[in-house]
Image (spheres, coloured by chain):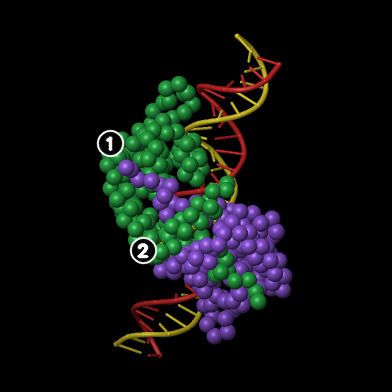
Chain colours: A green, B purple, C yellow, D red
DNA sequence: AGAAATTCGTTGCACAAACAACGACAAATG
DNA sequence: CATTTGTCGTTGTTTGTGCAACGAATTTCT
């Protein structure tokens, strides 16, 4: 019997991730015209307060250049502010503007609703599923 | 409490999928210099025999243009053959050459080994995990 | 303190992907 | 049977991503 792509885990994972991301991306695209990297940067900022590009790059699995460009667009749109670090002038500190915080309040609610839907589709195994994801993503 | 990106399912799913895909892609890149779309096309062909571009496009979650270009590269590399459909001359029939089949035999073994590793990392919940993925990917 | 190595963010470039448009063909409609 | 409508695969174009290189700034090492 030859190889079965449909049963192959990396393939399924890719397809599932793409579908889910697309579905959710449509929501924040409609709400604020955001791209995926922009959404991730905002979301991380909402939680972490002021933070450098490097921080985001590491924590959020995006290339430095992607974070940099996303941050510039978000600044132009008025959702975040760049400023210099007090003691280390290489670093750039990113933080949400009040408009950005308001936006993230709305998007956070949308995200929570979306996740609830997702968990409903997943049924009772949702926590186990999430744990498995962490295991897969954990080892760099 | 503000939004927690790390606990957000679509995000985790994306990151996990990217990590796993990357890891596996390194294997078939080393073995045969394949890209992800090329690998998917070959893998689908290995299972389905002769099949049209459209078929692959639908079943394998790749854009038509991506399938088309991947097929051309694979043909140039000698791993598949294009031919006309008997009765409908719009369709193009793709099928593996003997070299392509030999390649897929090797890659199939590599994939099986990889999946075994993955399941080991996932632990006992692996089947439930796979089922959840199917549920997520299932609804177009 | 001075030199070398390292880190941070940005930018340039090569490459792959998404989307639309097209020509060739087939099916449906009148 | 002619015309319209739809499908299939390819190709062109725009956009986004990944990687390397760079200037500015800091840390390390002697």
Foreground of the two, B65 or A126: A126
Image spot of residue A32 (x, y percent): 31, 48
Lateral position of residue D4 relative to residue A2, left or right:
left
Q: Can you identify the residue that label 2 sits on?
A: A120
- Residue B55's place in the image compared with A77, above or below, is below
Quadrant, the N terminus of chain A: bottom right
Query: Residue at left 48%, top 64%?
Result: B133
Query: Residue at left 60%, top 71%?
Result: A4
Mark 1, residues whose alpha carbon is within 10 Å: few (<14), some, or many (≥20)?
Answer: few
Q: Is residue B22 visible?
A: yes
Q: Is residue B69 visible?
A: no
Q: Name the chain letter of the residue that bears numbered label 1.
A: A
Report which quarter residue C3 is drawn in.
top right
Query: Residue at left 56%, top 58%?
Result: B122
Disc 2 is placed on an element classified as helix
Q: Earlier in the sequence, mark 1 or mark 2?
A: 1
Q: Are marks 1 and 2 on the same chain?
A: yes
Image spot of residue A140 (x, y percent): 57, 46
Disc 1 is placed on an element classified as helix
Report which quarter residue C4 is drawn in.
top right
Image spot of residue B125 (x, y percent): 52, 62
Q: Nearer the viewer, mark 1 or mark 2?
A: 2
Foreground of the two, B117 or A68: B117
* Number of marks in picture: 2
Q: Can you identify the residue that label 1 sits on?
A: A98
Query: Residue at left 61%, top 74%?
Result: B47
- Residue A118's place in the image compared with A108, above or below, is below
Image spot of residue D13 (x, y percent): 46, 54
């Amino acid at each position: 019997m030859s190889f079965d792509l449909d049963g192959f885990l990396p393939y399924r994972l890719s397809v599932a991730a793409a579908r889910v991301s697309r579905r959710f991306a449509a929501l924040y695209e409609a709400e604020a015209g955001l791209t995926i990297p922009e959404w991730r940067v905002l979301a991380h900022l909402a939680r972490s307060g002021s933070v450098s590009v490097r921080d985001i790059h590491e924590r959020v699995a995006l290339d430095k250049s992607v974070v940099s460009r996303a941050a510039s667009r978000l600044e132009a749109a008025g959702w975040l502010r760049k400023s210099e670090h007090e003691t280390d002038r290489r670093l750039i500190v990113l933080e949400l503007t009040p408009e950005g915080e308001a936006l993230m309040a709305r998007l956070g609610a949308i995200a929570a609703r979306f996740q609830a839907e997702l968990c409903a589709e997943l049924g009772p195994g949702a926590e186990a599923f999430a744990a498995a994801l962490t295991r897969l993503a954990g080892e760099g």
